[in-house]
Amino acid sequence: MSASEMDKTALKPSFAPSPLTTFFIKLAAVTCAVLVFFYVAFTLITGFIEERASELAILKGGPAFWGTMEEKLYKLASGPDLPPEKKEKIVSSLRTLSIRYKPYVDAIAGDVKSQQQR
């Protein structure tokens, strides 16, 4: 083969991207992956919060709140009564708390009375 034939058959150099181009391509790919991840995570978390918020009647106002309260009141009234031992224990605890915190409640009540007299 002659030199002129070798030049024609020689492989042409392939295009190699510069390191800066490679960096920007990788940066774009990672940025897209991160944005997709955060979008999916945000969508799932928002859906979970909305689902839980719809279950909580306290966060609702007006008729929804009072309807739920009425249902709970009926359920509590028609439920079984507490055993006498448990009732006595609760009443005893309430008496103890009443004796312990009575001076503070009286002080607050005295402040309210003195403000009302002015």
Image (cartoon, rainbow, N blue to C red):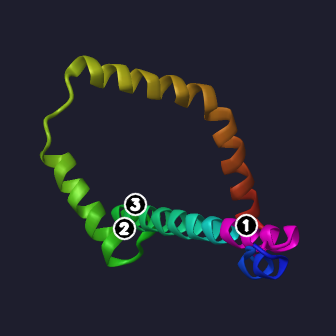
Cβ–Cβ under 8 Å for marks 2 and 3: yes
Q: Which residue is mark 3?
A: 52
Tag shown at residue 54 = 2
Cβ–Cβ under 8 Å for marks 1 and 2: no
- The quadrant of the picture occupied by the C terminus is bottom right
Q: Position of 112 compared to 3: left or right?
A: left
Mark in the foreground, 1 or 3: 1
Based on the picture, tell me whether residue 26 belongs to the magenta stretch. Answer: yes
- Indicate the position of residue 81 as horizontal and vertical percent values: 16, 33
Question: Within 10 Å of the Cα at label 2, are there few (<14), some (14-19), or many (20+) other Cα atoms?
Answer: few
Tag shown at residue 26 = 1
Q: CA distance from mark 1 to mark 3?
A: 39 Å
Image quarter for residue 65? Answer: bottom left
Q: Position of 31 compared to 45: left or right?
A: right
The kind of residue tagged 3 is Arg
Q: CA distance from mark 1 to mark 2?
A: 42 Å
The boundaries of the magenta stretch are: 13-30
Which residue sits at x=17%, y=51%?
Answer: 75
Mark 3 residue element: helix
Is 97 rendered above or below residue 24? above
Question: Within 10 Å of the Cα at label 1, are there few (<14), some (14-19), or many (20+) other Cα atoms?
Answer: few
The kind of residue tagged 2 is Ser
Mark 2 residue element: helix
Q: Nearer the viewer, residue 45 or 72?
A: 45
Which residue sits at x=72%, y=43%?
Answer: 107
Image quarter for residue 1? Answer: bottom right
Image quarter for residue 37? Answer: bottom right
Which residue sits at x=80%, y=79%?
Answer: 7
